[in-house]
Structure formats: C-alpha cells, structure tokens
Image (cartoon, helix red, strand yellow):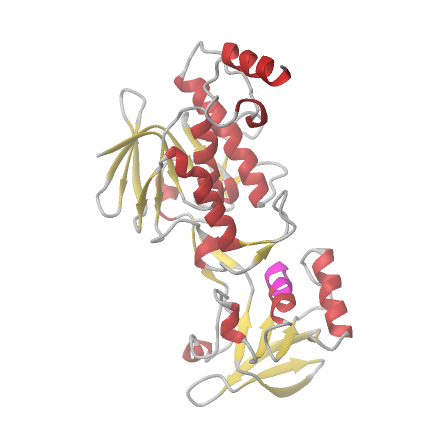
Amino acid sequence: MITTDILIIGAGPTGLFAVFEAGLLKMKCHLIDALPQPGGQLTELYPKKPIFDIPGFPSVNAGELVNNLMEQIKQFQPGFTLGETAQTLNKLEDGTFEVVTNKGTVHRAKAVAIAGGLGTFEPRKPTIENIADYEEKGVEYFIKEPEHFRNKKVVIAGGGDSALDWSIFLADIASEVTLVHRRNEFRGALDSVEKVQALKDQGKIRMMTPAEVTGIKGEDKVASITIEKEGETFDLETDYFIPLFGLTPKLGDIANWGLEIEKNAIVVNNALDYQTNIPGLYAIGDINTYPGKLKLILCGFHEATLMCQSVYNMLNPGKKYVLKYTTVSGVDGFDGSRKEAEKAVVKKID
C-alpha cells in the first residue's frame, strides 16, 4: 500500500506543478497516471508542439516544459504509479481517502487532487467513410514528431488553435502545407490567424476556405484527398492528411465517485480552493469547471497553488500559514513559520 499526504490523479503539467507547490509546504505527493510516462497530453500527443503562453518562455516545446517540471520537482522526490488508472475511491472513517487502480494498487492519502486534464480522450474524426482504412497509413490525428513530415505534402483540416499552430510550424518543414476549413472564419487565437494569413501571402501555406475534405484515395496509403469547395469537387495529391478537430473527453471511472459533474467536467469552488462537493477532494486544471473557467496550463498552475495551501491548512489546523517568497527564503525555507520568514527578510535586507 502506498501512503502520502496528497494523492494526485494525473501527471500532466498541472499535476506536476502541484508537487512543487506541495513540496514548498513540506507535503509529500504521489501521482497516478494511465500513461506510461509523466507529462499527460504534452508528452503523449504533441511533445514537439511549441507553447507560447507560459510566463517567462516566449516559446517552449511541450516536451521541454514537461522535462523542466520534472527537474523542478525532483528535489521533493514524488512517487509515481504509471500505466494504471484510478478506478475506485472511498473515504475512510479517519477521513483519509483510499484509491485503488485498475491493477489493484492501493493508495491512501489525506487529500486527493484530480488533475486528469481532459480525462481519457480520443480524437474527433471526420465523417469520411473509409478513413479507418488509412489510419497510420497517411491519416494522423496527432503530431508527435514533426520531422516525420519533412519534405512531404501535408493537408491539415480544422479551424482551431491546433490546426493553425501546426500549419505554422510545418510550413518550414513540409514541402507543401494545405489548410482546409469549412468556414472562412477561424476559432483560434487572432495572432495565429494573422500568422497563417501572412504565410499564405508568402506562398508557404495554401488555404482553402470554405471547403471540406470528403474522401481519401490511395492503394496502400494516402495518395490524395477529395475536397469539396463552393459546390465543386476535386482531388489533391498529398502524403498525409491530418484532421485536427479536437478531442472527445471522457471522465471514465471518476464519473462514478459521487462528484458534481457539469458538461463532462468536475464542478469546484473556485472562490476558495478548488475543492469539489466532497471535502478533501479537489479538482484542478482542465478537468474542472466553474464560472469564467479558462482551460489554460497557466490557470492550472494557479489552481494547483491554491489547492496546496488549502490542504496545508487542513492538515495543520491552528497553525497559521504565512505566505513567503522563494526569492527571499529559497525553496528549503518554506514550512509556514512566521519566525523563519522574518529572519529570512532581515537577512536579505542586511
């Protein structure tokens, strides 16, 4: 049996950063994740994708961000149960939680934080009759290794951030990039839309709107796709067809834990500490919902920070928590003690 202070379900960026915040408060963490390695979607779906909205990083690859987070938390020695999913949760008489995985591994913790991202997920596939015949034969739903597409003809379908970002990224790698979207307007960030338009003007991206991919042709692999645009149908030669229509999230066994669920997300109290309707059970990151929720990594970091402070207060009743800064006391100086904080400030001033 594995025991810890905080059991974190999900080893994506939010779950990993929660380990750091908990470590500053001298609390131990253990993480459960269905994937065989930490990182969540960043590692599994797009490790080479650049991320532009992490403070202090004009651009950082998803995989690099995960590596940095792992390096940051190494000092706190978190435990990992990887390749297993959290299946059952019970609250024991002493107030602790017991979580058992699909492989029978038993975990007990004083608090549980669900940081499962979108939960289990699968790509939304276009309604093309024979698309399954070409999966992994030229049809790709995720881009894990951009170099795989070097000097190849690529068609990307979609109108959101992923379709825009990958069109921009592959413009300097693939020999030809075509972006197909069924509307003239895009749902992605305005900056990305402007970059795609600029690349189109430079002849680096071919844009087809409003248009839709309706068919795939080829013997053993994709050779061409059929596009319908403004009532006309034509074939376009390509090596790869990459439909990026988002993911269909599923909560899995977590949905049976008695949590308040709204539109496949866990309702939390964002006015306080991101606790669910079950005391001691929190939900942070993309898996939760509340008024004004934004599904951004940096928002998950913020939620993880407040969650850890709440758990600290719960585990240390009567001990006043004093906010301190790593710039003053470093990482080792965090334990909630006002006296040590004052010493650190005096030393800094001197």
In the image, is residue 222 above or below residue 102?
A: below
Coordinates of residue 186 in the picture (x, y in percent): 70, 62
- Which residue is pictured at 45% across the width and 25% down the height? 332
In the image, is residue 90 above or below residue 63?
A: above
Could you tell whether 204 is left or right of 312 in the image? right
Toward the viewer: 193 or 128?
193
- Figure quadrant of the C terminus: top right
Could you tell whether 200 is left or right of 131 in the image? right
Toward the viewer: 320 or 292?
320
Could you tell whether 104 is left or right of 205 in the image? left
Magenta: main secondary structure equals helix
In the image, is residue 229 above or below residue 242?
A: below
- Which residue is pictured at 36% across the width and 52% down the height? 37
Toward the viewer: 31 or 131?
31
Q: Does the magenta portion include 294?
A: no
Residues drawn in magenta: 159-165
- Which residue is pictured at 49% across the width and 41% down the height? 14
Name the quadrant containing residue 210.
bottom right
- Image mark count: 0
Toward the viewer: 255 or 87?
87
